[in-house]
Each structure stands twice: as C-alpha cells, then as structure tokens.
Image (cartoon, grey):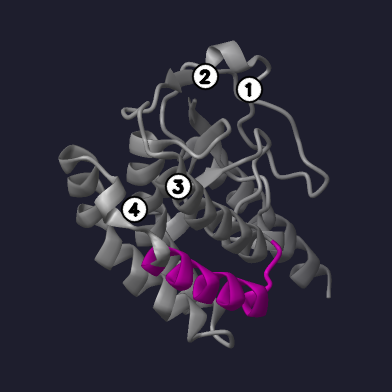
C-alpha cells in the first residue's frame, strides 16, 4: 500500500515538472499554483503578452455577426472539453457546422473570402467529427487541435468582437504540443480537463 502511495506521488510530480519544463519560451512571467497544485504559466500583466491586431477592419457587419457566431460556438466547445463534457462539445460542434453554412460569402472582399475559404472545409470537417463523437472525448480532442488552428486563422483575420487569447499546451498530442483560443486570460486546458486544468501558457492576445 505504501509503495502505491509513493508511486502515485512520483507520477504526479513528474506530470507537474513536465508541464512546466515543456512549455515554450515566452516573454511573460511563469506563475502561480492552481487548486490542483499543478503549476502553470500566467501573466501578471496583460501588457506583457504579445498583442496581435486583426487584419481586416472593414468586415461587413452581417458577415461579422456570423463569424462571431462561429467563434462563440468554438469557445463553447472549448469550455465543454475543459469541463470533460463530451455531450456539450458535440452539441457545440453541430451548432458550429450550422453557423459555418450560414455565412454569406458574397459579403466578403476577395481577400477576406480567400482566408475564409482556406479554413472553411477543414473547420467544418473537424466540427462534424466532434458532433458525431459524443461518447469519445479523446477523438473530439484530436479534432480540436486542427479546429483550433483554423479558428486562430479566422480570429486573426476577422476578429470576434472582443479580445481573445492564444494559449498553448506543451503536453497535448503526446507532448507534441497544441494551441487553442480562449476568451479567458486564465488557463483552462481543453486537452486534459480536470486532469491538468492549468497546464499551459498564454502566447498572445488578439484584439
């Protein structure tokens, strides 16, 4: 029994160390302990986070509303994964598919349409996979990796009506690392949920 307790303590310690040491170099402070004693990177001052300005400032208001809806469904999906709720993630994936289909691309300029077209099919495919796998959160998280990259491209181009944070987890995808977009400055890891909720760093704020 004592051996099992010691082994559990060692494994937990290694996970904490791996989360901290595997993170990318950033310009901001590495920070505080969360309630689960997993150390994660936070930013004591938002001014220390790299700021990214969106590319398009002249997006048609109707198109902007639809893009915001797509991003909002993504954020809802992200929060569901952070809470280990595969059913809600599936619902948000289904709603995202609907939102993507609603965008009237005739409202976009040629340059804006090019950016949207480059990400549309891939984003829709990931959303469909997530919506169809309510009983398989591991599969949902695998598709969330690619979905996050597509959303990142859209947000950098079009914005979403509010500041958003580009976060990174060094341990996702079996230590390959993966990013996500969040409306929160505090880290809530969608790749590990309750297992390691605070593992990650804030890379950028997109305004």
The residue pinned by badge 1 equals: 43
Q: Nearer the viewer, residue 22 or 70?
A: 70
- CA gap between label 3 and label 1 equals 35 Å
Q: Is residue 86 found inside the magenta-colored segment of the image?
A: yes
**In contact (CB < 8 Å): disc 3 and disc 1:** no
Lateral position of residue 154 relative to residue 118, left or right: right
Circle nearer the N terminus (3, 1): 1
Circle nearer the N terminus (1, 4): 1
The residue pinned by badge 2 equals: 49
Q: Nearer the viewer, residue 171 or 67?
A: 67
Q: Residue at x 50, y 85 (%)?
A: 133
The answer to whether residue 106 is above or below residue 202 is: below
**In contact (CB < 8 Å): disc 2 and disc 4:** no
Q: Nearer the viewer, residue 89 or 41?
A: 89
| Residue at the farthest top position | 47
Q: Position of residue 53 (x, y in %)?
A: 40, 22
Circle nearer the N terminus (1, 2): 1
**In contact (CB < 8 Å): disc 2 and disc 3:** no
The answer to whether residue 58 is above or below residue 86 is: above
Q: Which residues are magenta?
A: 83-101
- CA gap between label 1 and label 2 equals 7 Å
| Nearest to viewer (mark 1 / mark 4) | 4
**In contact (CB < 8 Å): disc 1 and disc 2:** yes
Q: Quadrant of the N terminus?
A: bottom right
| Nearest to viewer (mark 2 / mark 4) | 4
The residue pinned by badge 3 equals: 62
Circle nearer the N terminus (4, 3): 3
Q: Is residue 150 found inside the magenta-colored segment of the image?
A: no
The answer to whether residue 37 is above or below residue 69 is: above
Lateral position of residue 195 relative to residue 162, left or right: right
The residue pinned by badge 4 equals: 150
- CA gap between label 1 and label 4 equals 25 Å
């Amino acid at each position: 029994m004592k051996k099992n307790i010691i082994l559990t303590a060692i494994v937990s310690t290694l996970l904490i160390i791996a989360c901290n040491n595997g993170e990318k170099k950033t310009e901001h402070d590495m920070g505080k302990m969360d309630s689960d004693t997993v150390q994660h990177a936070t930013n004591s001052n938002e001014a220390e986070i790299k700021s990214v300005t969106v590319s398009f400032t002249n997006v048609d208001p109707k198109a902007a509303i639809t893009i915001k809806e797509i991003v909002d469904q993504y954020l809802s999906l992200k929060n569901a994964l952070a809470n280990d709720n595969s059913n809600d993630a599936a619902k948000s994936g289904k709603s995202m598919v609907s939102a993507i289909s609603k965008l009237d691309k005739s409202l976009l300029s040629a340059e804006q349409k090019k950016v949207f077209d480059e990400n549309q099919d891939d984003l829709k495919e990931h959303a469909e996979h997530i919506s169809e796998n309510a009983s398989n959160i591991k599969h949902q998280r695998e598709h969330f990796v690619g979905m996050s990259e597509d959303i990142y491209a859209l947000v950098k181009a079009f914005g979403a009506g509010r500041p958003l944070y580009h976060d990174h987890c060094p341990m996702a995808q079996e230590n390959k690392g993966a990013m996500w977009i969040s409306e929160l400055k505090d880290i809530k890891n969608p790749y590990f949920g309750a297992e390691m909720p605070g593992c990650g760093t804030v890379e950028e704020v997109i305004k």
